[in-house]
Every structure is written in C-alpha cells, then in structure tokens.
Image (spheres, rainbow, N blue to C red):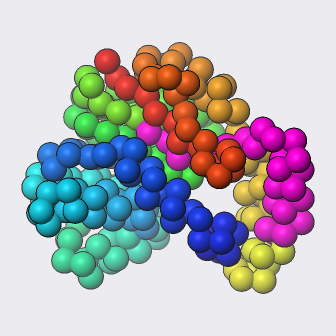
Amino acid sequence: MNDAMSGGVHRCWKSAFIERLAPAPDTRLLDVAGGTGDIALRFLDYVRAQNGGALGAAHVTVFDINPEMLRVGAQRFSKLGLENGGPHVAFVEGNAEELAGIEDNSMDAYTIAFGIRNCTHIDHVIRQAYRVLKPGGRFMVLEFGKVNNPLLSTLYDTYSFRVIPHLGQILANDRDSYQYLVESIRKFPTQQQFVDMMKHEGFQVVGQGYEDLTFGVATIWSGWKL
C-alpha cells in the first residue's frame, strides 16, 4: 500500500530522512513507531556505507506499541544476521507518550517516521523525546505535511479522498483505515505549528526547522537538545 499510494516515493523520503540525520559509527538511535524496521535498516546501512562496511558501535532501539509489527521487524533483522538484543539492535514494546524503560539523556538521536500523527498527545511525545536525548542530541520527525500551493493542494486532496481509500479496499481489503489516514493527515499541525510545538518543549531549530519533500506532501522536522 505504501508503494501504491506514493508511487514508491516513500522509499526516497525515508532515505533522505536518514541522510539528513547523517549518523556516526557510534550513534545510539531511538526509532519510535518503527516496528517493521524500515528506518532502523536504513540507519545501519548508512553507518555501514560510511564506515568501510563496519557498524562500529552503532545501535538502534526500535520502539513500537504494536507487538506484531515488532515481531515482523525482529524477524526481518534476524534474516540479516542482526539479532534482537545483540550489539546493534533491540526491539522494545511501549507507548511513545511514555517511553517506559528508556533512560534520561541516553540517546544520541530520536527518529519517528509516519508515526507521530497517530499519537493522541503529540506534545507528550515531543516532551519524552527531549527527556531521553543526550545534550546535543537530535530529534527528527518524518510525517505528512501540508501542500501550500493551491493548485497542487486541490489535486492532492482529490487524490487523497477519492483514490487512496479505494486502493485500501482493493489492495488491503481495508477502506476504513485508509480513510482515517487521509483524514488524520489533514488534522495534523502545519509545518510551522509543529516547529512551535518543538520549541515549546525545549528544542532548538536551525533555520525554519523543517524541510518539505515533494511540495510538502511529506516533511522532515529537526530539532536539537542543547
């Protein structure tokens, strides 16, 4: 469904997300709502590519509220020789609004890709991210944004409400979930509103604090705990 909805562009968005993070060989990453491991795999692949094929001390904790998704992610990693609980990856079940079991000031980076939109209290999620990051740590969000060009916005709305739910019915036999998807995107804060929420919880931003991808269909937000 991700490939069908975006024409495969979601893969480019996720790769760009990790490139902007530019993790080092000793980065400890907390990837929230990342159950199936898409971002975690890209993180480790990036480190390996930049470090002569070695993973160094890089480690990712994949944190998700859905145990089934975590199970899929753990199996996916195991096939690649990366075992859950090993030196480079751990899969942890929990709520993004609490991050139970994640210590204060313990992570170099925090990522959440296409997950924060589904959280009930977004401000709690941002506050917890600030808590677990080390001083100098980076908070990065990849989420659907707002298309500001009026013509493109009209076309995007037409596609979202008339096509995506039908695709959900045809490919996943689940129209309601994809109707919710397009409605939840419209309810999510604007790019600037989300930057303001980050600042309110203590994060510092460089420049405008966000980067639009594909005319704002997706957006990367970035903040620092200084």
Q: Magenta stretch containing residue 149, yes or no?
A: yes
Location of residue 43 with respect to 69 vertically, above or below: above
Q: Magenta stretch containing residue 142, yes or no?
A: yes
Q: x, y percentage for residue 87?
A: 12, 59
Location of residue 26 with respect to 49 vertically, above or below: above
Q: In percent of the image, x 33 and y 77: which residue is there?
A: 75
Quadrant placement of the N terminus: bottom right
Tally of marks: 0
Q: In percent of the image, x 53 and y 42: which residue is there?
A: 220
Q: Is residue 33 visible?
A: no
Q: Is residue 155 left or right of residue 129?
A: right
Q: Is residue 223 left or right of residue 40?
A: right
Q: In percent of the image, x 51 and y 65: which residue is there?
A: 11
Q: x, y percentage for residue 72?
A: 41, 74
Quadrant placement of the C terminus: top left
Q: Is residue 224 visible?
A: yes
Task: Using the rendered view, name the quadrant where residue 40 is placed.
Answer: bottom left
Q: x, y percentage for residue 99?
A: 38, 40
Q: Which residues are magenta?
A: 140-165
Q: In percent of the image, x 19 and y 62: which residue is there?
A: 48
Q: Is residue 5 left or right of residue 108?
A: right
**Front one among 122 and 209:** 209
**Front one among 52 and 28:** 52
Q: Is residue 128 left or right of residue 198?
A: left
Q: x, y percentage for residue 219?
A: 59, 43
